[in-house]
Image: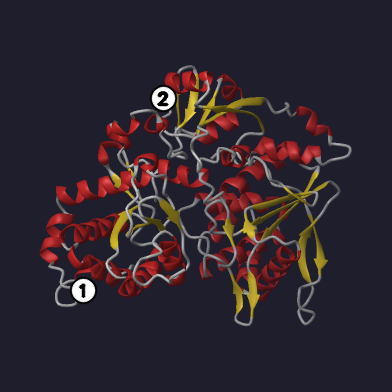
Amino acid sequence: MVARRLLASLLLAGLGAGACVVHTPAPTPAAPRTVVEPTPPPSSSAAPIATPTVVPGVPVELYVMSECPFCPAAVEAMAGAMHLLSPHVAASLEFVGEVDAKGLASMHGAREVAGDVAQICAASIAPDRALDFVVCQNRRPEPVDESWAACADENGIPSARLRACVEGPEGTRLLAASFERARSRGVRGTPTVLVAGRKHEGVRTPTAFARAICAASDPPPASCARLAPAVPVAITVLSDSRCKDCHPERQESMLRMRIERPVFRWLDYASPEGRALYDATAPGTLPAVLFDASLEADPDALASFGDATRLAGGHRILQSGAGSWNPRCADRGGCALSECGNHWVCRKESPGKLELFMMSQCHFAAQRVQQLRDLLKTLGPVDLSVEFIGAVGPSNALSSMHGPAEVAEDLRQICAQKHYRQGRRFLQYVACRSADYRSDDWRACTGARTGIDPRVLQRCAEGEEGRALLTASFRRSQQLGIAASPTFVANRLHKFSARDADAIRTSFCEHNQAWKGCPRR
């Protein structure tokens, strides 16, 4: 998967906040105590369904998908909260999905539906061990549609009863009812936690969940007295008022997901204090997030950042890659610095230039490549360049979101661009591969079909030439702060996204009004 720095940049840029959305290890703590009562199913023709409901206490609803990559941490954290507060919490495990004419559907496919069934059956049979059961599945290498039997044995859930529920109609009815409860509550993404009916927007750690539950209790259970109050963590967000696309406020929502009591200070590079802090800590690009020693007093927050921070100048700097603005480049004479040639402030307008930043195995980029190929037939001699989004790690190791196969294809495509740029011949290869981007048969897009010599491509892609080309492309994307695939840039200065060919034309023509194929105004 994507390298830590690239993933962090996506999160901080607001492109992902740790949720799977429908449509378009610590020792395992005790699970919540619940009772089982009959609940009507969504369809009046079905039999009554037994479902976990409340015991006296604060109602907590945890909505998950069994294969959502963000859910295991939330489940384990909630299990920890239950360990701290049980039996004073009424918790229920719910699932997000759809019921249609063909049956049950979930975001990650049929295997996830089977995992959901196993987990809700376990919650129905042994509600006091439901979270332990899910934590067990999340820790095992087997897929969720297979690991339920072993996790039932591990947690003392009667395997015969669980099998009957999983393989019979009861599990399907239970899951359909849970899907309906999620729909009726307006829950479409996972993990979602409702505490006393209100969505929990903050930190997902055992103590943070426990504090939120205590805050919703009136009066709070006696166990809440054992919880120490959250400590304030001082955070400095350093930005530069000259940067129009920095949006330092976007860091706040991400940080509030990791730190219970953040105390923010906003500092401008142009101020003497801001410049001195930048010089002392050398964060590189802005906006930058810097912590003082108070972060050490919040072990949960510190642990959530892992090794993504470094110490410098008496501060801990978040190595997020969130910012792309190098303030040195905007200073007088800054464009003469070696690292500034590709910086936004140093780029010069180039009419008729169109850049596409993409990942070669990104579904959305594949669609835009097909549309772009056809569009360029009407736009004429546009100067097209394709750049690639990825990470350059230690020892110049290259990585990309969709794995090594994507890096290998990125290498072939950037080599095609280098050796077959005249007449945009390289685009024929890129479009051919995009039409079937999951296929390993890249040679099918060479030869007479596209005019690309496979020997030229292979020699470049598997040698130092291709590696140097792709490394430079990854770094250009990072310097510009472009992490979303696909992203377009018109005339080297104007960044935009587009859903179809008409949107690409409109944005390009907005900055090239006299261009052939652009509507006259």
Which color mode does the image show?
A: secondary structure
**Residue reaching furthest to the front:** 521
Q: Is residue 47 left or right of residue 79?
A: right
Mark 1 residue element: helix
Front residue of 432 and 161: 432
The answer to the question of whether label 1 and label 2 lie on touching residues, with beta carbons closer than 8 A, is: no
Looking at the image, is mark 1 or mark 2 nearer the viewer? 2
Give the image location of residue 116, x and y in percent. Answer: 60, 63
**Residue reaching furthest to the right:** 219
Front residue of 517 and 334: 517
Q: Is residue 435 left or right of residue 177?
A: left
Compute the Cα span from label 1 to label 2: 48 Å
Q: Residue at x 29, y 49 (%)?
A: 473
Give the image location of residue 253, x and y in percent. Answer: 62, 42
Q: Residue at x 68, y 67 (%)?
A: 179
Quadrant in the picture for residue 336? top left
Front residue of 256 and 86: 256
Q: Which residue is mark 2?
A: 282
Q: Residue at x 79, y 52 (%)?
A: 197
Residue type highlighted by circle 2: Ala
Please rate how many residues cluster around mark 1, counting C-alpha atoms within 10 Å: few if below 14, some from 14 to 19, many from 20. Answer: some
Q: Which residue is mark 1?
A: 444
Residue type highlighted by circle 1: Ala
Give the image location of residue 453, x and y in percent. Answer: 12, 67
Mark 2 residue element: loop
N-term-proximal mark, 1 vs 2: 2
Give the image location of residue 46, x and y in percent. Answer: 76, 79
- Indicate which disc residue 147 carries: none
Q: Is residue 305 above or below residue 118?
A: above
- Determine if residue 219 is in view: yes
Quadrant in the picture for residue 189? bottom right
Q: Is residue 259 above or below residue 110?
A: above
